[in-house]
Image: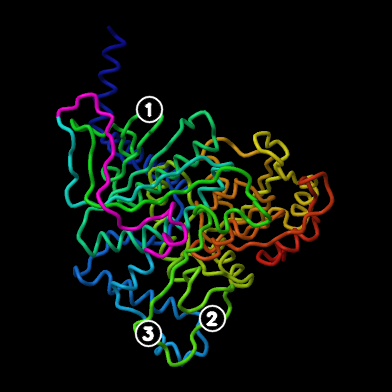
Amino acid sequence: SIVYRVMIWCCRSFVMSHVWIWFVVCFYVSFLNFALSINAQHHEVHYIVPPSYLDSDRPPNGYIMEWAESMKSDLTYHLKPSDIITDAKALLPSPHDLHEQFCHGPSKVFAEYLNYSSGEHCILTGSKNVKKPVEYIENAHVSVLNLKECTNPTHFLTEYSRPLSYFVRHCEMVKAKEENLQYWTLLKIHRDHRNNPKYYWSDLVSNWLAEGLAGSSRRSLIRLRYENQLLYSDWTQFESDAEKICFRSHSSFFAQIAGDWKRTGEHYTDKNKLAGLNWSFTIEPSTQPEQSLESLKGVTKPETFFSRRFVTPWATVVASHELIAALDKKSRLGLIRTRYTEPPLENPTASEFSRLLLNRLKRETRVARILVYDRKAQSDARNTRTWLNANETVDKLHAVYGERINLTHLHSMPTTILEQSELYCSDIIIAPHGGHMGNLLFSTNTYIIESKSINVWYHWMTYGFGHFFYNARAGPGRGRDHTMDPEEVVAAVQRVLPSE
């Protein structure tokens, strides 16, 4: 047909004129530019997250020596005056003995909840094609993580992540590297939580942490007790023709909260069942000291040099690096959003935090992102701690800062972990205390203005994650519902973000 002949002629002319080459090049460049711009929106600049300790490469006899040298410096952190530090280090036991005392210490206080370096551990596979009674995982050590029910799972996960990261980084990983063992994790989940957003959030993040700590989904298992299944952490079936599998050795970490957060006037998470665990351990000196080293400066009683409740900054920071590295991997897969744009500060002051924030905004050429969350529509929580007059603070912030801020005001949290993590990539968060603060795991160096604050929860993240907390006074209200003074809140923001 005439139309067909015209089309053929046009195509030949287009090809012969070489215009098509320019067309293809321009199209490709435009597409690449668009793809890069989309990628830049979703993957901000990350600082170089330190690799997991399992990925380090040192001589076989160097791992525990390196750990002991760092720990000795950490243990003398609070000693005053400085001229006794050298003498104090000389009193510490050998690297192996120091490691044993550190790792076995909590089991003497929390015998049911943490046991380091026990014997063989076996678990049922749930296989329907059993041909043999047992399969041995050769040359392998496993951390068995047993997480029971709790009243606030998002809150709980954030609290047990501290002792979990201590336990894995300082005990399990050092043991695996020193003895040249494969390191595995086994997460036991007792109930089906897929229809409960809070519990599902906790189960999902717990699984990500376990997989990240193990270093591979092929060495990270999930035991679903409610379905009698054994899965890899990527939710694929663990294939075995054995009734059970057995590991050469194991340690166990058992965390449980069942009931209210307070009992007999004490904070439940401060001393009980591994939520917010203080890492209690006792050092047996190599020789008796000639001078008293019992009193440490700037620490809570009854901590002394030889009887510890808290490990000091280095131990917390490097343990937190393991958590950050695990979640960073999931962020790069697009499963969550994180803001690990700078190395974490260590217990920052307002002026230190302000310098960091202003440099961040200049480097990323953007305005500050502020999240205001008042909990007015949070219907799935008891005693919600509603912030009654949040609108007044929002209006005041807009009046003071205008277009210099990007403010999001929410009455309830979104249900998906991806949406929540994106919100918590904000630079400043203003909200009442609550389980939503569990999302602080997804960022470093965030400023939190918190009402109805309870300091033993979340505030440990000033070390390791670099978060900076301000406790806002709660004004009149109904029960735990309350107001906040807009002038106080705006003044708190101005501490780190100048209004001029």
Q: Tell me the element at label 1.
A: loop
Image position, residue 66 (x, y; %): 30, 73
Q: Which residues are magenta?
A: 104-131
Q: Tell me the element at label 3.
A: helix
| First of labels 2, 1 by sequence position | 1
Badge 1 is on which residue? 227
Badge 2 is on which residue? 296
Report the side of 298 relative to 14 (left or right): right
Judging depth in this view, the residue of 353 and 403 nearest the camera is 353
Q: Are marks 2 and 1 in contact (CB under 8 Å)?
A: no
Between marks 1 and 3 in the image, the one whose residue lies nearer the viewer? 3
Q: Amino acid at mark 3?
A: Leu
Q: Tell me the element at label 2.
A: loop
Give the total number of marks visible in the rendering: 3
Who's the residue at 69% across and 44% down the image? 409
Judging depth in this view, the residue of 203 and 436 nearest the camera is 203
Q: Amino acid at mark 1?
A: Glu
Marks 3 and 2, how far apart at CA: 16 Å
Which residue occupies the extreme top position in the image? 1
Who's the residue at 31% across and 60% down the image? 173
Image position, residue 108 (x, y; %): 43, 62
Badge 3 is on which residue? 91
